[in-house]
Amino acid sequence: MKRLGIGMIGLGLAVKPHALALRELTDQVEFIGAFSPTAQRRREFETTYGLPTVSAMDVLLTDPRVDALIILTPPRTHAELALRAARAGKHVLLEKPIDVTLEEARAVVEGVEAAGRKLGVVFQHRFRNGAKTLRARLSERALGDLLSVSCSVRWWRGPDYYAQPGRGMLARDGGGVLLTQAIHTLDVMLDLAGPAKQVSAFCRTSVFRNMDTEDIACAAVEFRNGAVGVIDATTAAYPGYPEQIAIAGTRGSAVLEAESLTVNLMGEAPVKLEGSMAGGSGADPMAFSHEPHRRLIEDFVDAVRSDREPRSNGRSALAAHALIDAILLSSRKGERVEVEST
């Protein structure tokens, strides 16, 4: 079978796990080239990963060998680049978030669909072993009816992280801890438990940072299946702790902590699946394995070849955007808010 031609746009912080994954997938993909408008980044990418670069983005958009583009640029550039790629006939694997609001994210999804291309979203936490195992158990209704679903993302980002120009500002990132960091855990929580119905929330900016987005957020949430829970997210919890999703049902409970899973069912011995606790919770946001990225890219490649939707596709990714928008709106209005259906 012909290898899928892949190009990449953006060589910033997010590039490492993608590059490492692509180097291991040479039997499935042909890496055509990567583009950054910064020549130094292109040189560093070639030296570090031994992969080629191109001097202009149009080279990737017009090259018939390129079947799909991985886009790793800042959020406010996503819509323009994803739609240009799709209209040029390229499938798109887009770094999270899709865009900075649910409305804008939905427009990207619809635009790529209208072009007849596949849209994958980089929510690689869905491909961790613990998350995959728990999702399978939930699909079997092993925990019974869900009663309580909560998540906690108590991370730390130090001064060096926020020293990058525009980091944490609406103009560059489009959002704070919810859209930039906690969105991964929120996505897994929703992938496991189903969509949220309504929230009541508070969002704040800590004394550590001079920025116009939140680095502290908490919310009470009701899910459409009737479960209730809490969301606790911050990048102001030094030195940073593994993110956690806790689910309780009528037949037992489960705790997913980073990549480790514990399931306790009534009348059965506890089941534990050990995994890495290093999920980028501390000062180094890239301190994690690239294995989930490799699995995500493999799934995306197979989806293009098989003409099916990727496991982490644009439509399914909208649920996290809807929840984040509702949390931010609830905090601004000081009242309970309905989460828009996606």
Image: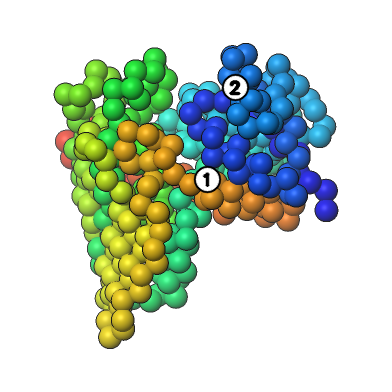
- Residue 330: x %, y % from top left: 23, 38
In depth, the one of 114 and 274 nearer the eye is 274
In depth, the one of 133 and 283 nearer the eye is 283
Residue 173 picture quarter: top left
- Residue 258: x %, y % from top left: 36, 53
Who comes first in sequence, dot 1 or dot 2? 2
Label 2 Cα crowd, 10 Å radius (few <14 / some 14-19 / many 20+): few
Up/down of 100 relative to 303, above or below: above
For the residue marked with disc 2, what is the amino acid? Glu
For the residue marked with disc 1, what is the amino acid? His
260 relative to 220 in the view: left or right: right
Residue under label 2, please give it. Answer: 44
**Element under label 2?**
helix
In depth, the one of 97 and 259 nearer the eye is 259
Say which residue appears at 25% left-offset and 63% top-offset: 148
Residue under label 1, please give it. Answer: 290
Say which residue appears at 35% left-offset and 25% top-offset: 161
- Residue 155: x %, y % from top left: 28, 40
